[in-house]
Amino acid sequence: MTTHNKAQTNLIHAPRQAPQYIETIQPPLFRASTIIFKSTAHLFDRHWSDAYDYSYGTHGTPTTFTLGDNIAQIEGGRYCLLAPSGLSAINLVNSALLSSGDEVWVADNIYGPNLEHLNNLQDRYGITVEIYNPIDANSFQPTEKAKLIWLEAAGSVTLEFPDLKNLVKKAQQANVLTALDNTWGAGLAFNAFDFSDEHLAVDITVHALTKYPSGGGDILMGSVVTHEQALHHKLFRMHAIQGISISGDDAAQIQRSLAHMSLRYEQQAQSALTLLDWLKQQPQFTQVLHPSDPDAAGHSFWSEICSTGKSAGLVSVIFKPEYDLNAVRKFCDSLNLFKLGFSWGGPVSLVMLYDLKQMRALENTHLQQGLLVRFCIGLEHPEDLIQDIQNGLKQLD
């Protein structure tokens, strides 16, 4: 009888394994595409809607479910789906909830790629995209075809805090689903699923975990959080159909960062307030934008909903009209600590230049004319950041 060396097989089916569960500070990392079933009973006595459906890596592992549960808790919801990026999470909501002939409403200060995706759906599938002024709830006039309204608190780039209460009330009266891009608030500035004395709530929050939850500027991920099971299942089905999934390694990295997210959020927000006070004194700017500023559009909405005074570490400025594109580009290029790049929430401060005339469909009388620069505050000392901006402004003399 011929014998053979079992070394190769034993490498795959190890005869001895260490006990797999111990208590550690960080939960264990599971990397999986294939998940092994104990028996055919375990294979068939399961359903995709089970709370923890361990059937294939795209459906989830203990690593991804742990992160999802924690994000849902932070946001104030019950169910969480994870996606490879914030934009992917946004697109999941649009794909799951909108059909041909439906009407979707977006704020004039909407995150640009979301609007681009909706315009693509409009061109290809006959979805109607309508635009409203986020600080004027009367501009939201849904018809019987309206299915979804996108909210941002605060809005992209110009940082207006919306009339969230009245917008949600109008949407509920018209049976329109509400989806909030909650990346700015990060689940920390206010509870989107209970944000008023009347216990108003949005239906969905989307969060770019790329930003504050990650905190390192090195991981892409998004989340979709809901409170109602039926809505979660509708989104979950589309999530499965589209094969949306994330890396276990990425999930573990973000899970590791959650413990200090609120500390980073508060420090960056405080640094932004320090910069806000200084920026308002600089003669080169015609307007400084931050929801905590009493002169800001939507300030009263922010102060009521974000009653603890929390705000993210972003502040935007509008240069006086005499500073043309070349001058403002020169300013941005001369900065040293502020790096030119998109996103926020990481340790390095970022700066980005925008031309509002190319970004808005409605007339925004609260915005001054001029080129806009957004500062995304990192973890540097605020006095060093002020000095960096001051040096950049000297290039304009």
Image (cartoon, rainbow, N blue to C red):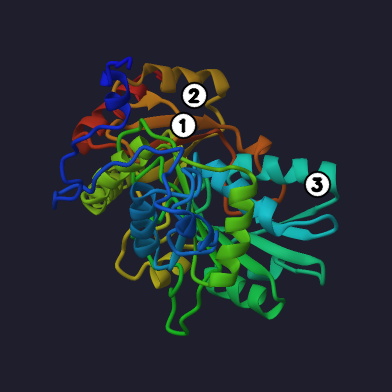
Do the residues bearing badges 2 and 1 touch, measured as CB atoms within 8 Å?
no
136 to 219, vertically: above or below: below
The disc, 2 or 1, on the residue closer to the chain's N-terminal end is: 2
Q: Which quarter of the rendering shows the N terminus? A: top left
- In the rendered structure, the answer to whether residue 330 lies left or right of residue 238 reads left
- In this rendered view, identify the residue nearer to me: 253 or 107: 253
Determine whether the residue tagged by mark 3 lies in a helix, strand or loop: helix
The amino acid pointed to by label 1 is Phe
Q: Where does residue 2 sit, x and y in percent of width and height? A: 33, 14
From the top left corner, tell me how far across and down residue 337 is, in percent.
28, 24
Q: Nearer the viewer, mark 2 or mark 3?
A: 3
Q: Quadrant of residue 295?
A: bottom left
Residue at which label 3 appears: 122
Circle 1 crowding by C-alpha within 10 Å: few under 14, some 14–19, many from 20: few
Q: Secondary structure at mark 1?
A: loop
The answer to which of 1 and 275 lies nearer the viewer is: 1
- Marks 1 and 3 sit apart, C-alpha to C-alpha, by 27 Å
Res. 102 in view:
yes
Q: Secondary structure at mark 2?
A: helix
The image quadrant where one finds the C terminus is top left
Q: Which residue is mark 1?
A: 342
Q: Quadrant of residue 356?
A: top right
The dot on residue 89 is none
Mark 2 or 3, nearer chain start: 3
Q: CA distance from mark 2 to mark 1?
A: 17 Å
Question: What's the distance in space between the residues labelled 2 and 3, CA to CA?
Answer: 35 Å
- Residue at the image position 44 percent from the left and 36 percent from the top: 220
